[in-house]
Image (spheres, rainbow, N blue to C red):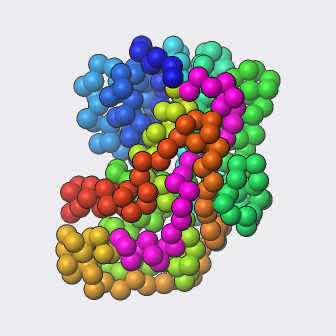
Amino acid sequence: MMINKNKTVLITGAAGFIGSNLVEKLLTKGYQVKAIDNFATGYKKNINPFLENENFFFKEGDIRNLETCQEACKNVDFILHQAALGSVPRSINDPITSNEVNVGGFLNMLVAAKENNVKRFVYAASSSTYGDSTALPKIEDNIGKPLSPYAVTKLVNEVYADVFQKVYGLDTIGLRYFNVFGRRQDPNGAYAAVIPKFVMQLMKHESPIINGDGTFSRDFTYIDNVVQMNLRAIETDNQEALNQVYNTAVGDRISILEMAELLRSMLADYDPKIAKIEIKHGPNRKGDVPHSLASIEKAQEKLNYQPTHVFKDGLKEAVAWYWENLK
């Protein structure tokens, strides 16, 4: 492992759910942390606890501005690029903005990283890249065709990262996130992820609505596993691990209906009335991948990744956090 003392890491999207968890972890490990966010989907409250830390430097900024990216990348050793517009439905409703942020902004960051001689560029890729491939488990080298504009943007990121390594020698690692959940994930808004959205609805004694019959399944991945993968990616000294993409997941799956029932049961421990709330069903959603299950063998082999939280353990921690912070 590399020695991280005095190393500076830039986190884009630092006020977001994943970004703020990365900020917290890196500061506890002694890194200097630079951070940018434009608060499009992130929140100031997520980074407020760190603003007094002498090793934390935050600047509000938008990755669609190349000068902002250039300034942010000065004197940086590693980049953890989390800034993006997530959500398949959002990309279907507004493909242009998703492309501007996820492709244009990504390219700006690559250019700025290259020109500032950043050692390594680690970025949030996505399991949506597997598209219409029905093969399970998902193996990094076997992808299908994208099913949404969001998936297209994330596939383009991987292609650009590969080209920047070949042409400019910028070392990159892509982390294909699989349905990340956990503390600080936003339960509000039209594009809220399913777990925090269902938590909020159940806490309000409202019925969560599943898209379809609930048999679609996901490899839900707790935030601590994702933080670990990002750390592994910047700390590895295994040259063979560089310029690769990795599934960032648990390697297990649960159906949406089973997830909702488990969530209801866990929340009922805090409020018994929740146990009686009906789970309802709506139409299938455009662009949804029916099943996702990751092979994590490559990450285990090359990055020494060992997930610490299976789904139920992560969900229990997440529910406790939501109950404490949202009730």
Q: Which residue is at 43% across, 57% downward?
A: 310
> Which of the two residues, 141 or 62, is positioned nearer the viewer here?
141
Is residue 321 in sight in this rendering? yes
- Looking at the image, residue 76 sits to the left or right of residue 314; the answer is right
Query: Can residue 158 be found in the magenta stretch?
Result: no
Compared to 295, does 211 lie above or below?
below
Which quadrant would residue 39 be assigned to in this image?
top left
Q: Nearer the viewer, residue 252 or 214?
A: 252
Residue under the image location 43 percent in, 60 percent down: 311
Decide if residue 39 is in sight here. Answer: no
Magenta stretch: residue 257 in it?
A: yes
Report the residue at 31% width, 56% height from top. 317
Residue numbers of the magenta segment: 236-263
Residue 155 lies left or right of residue 113; in this view the side is: right
Locate the C terminus and report the quarter of the image it occupies. bottom left
Where in the figure is residue 66, as x and y percent of width and height?
A: 61, 27
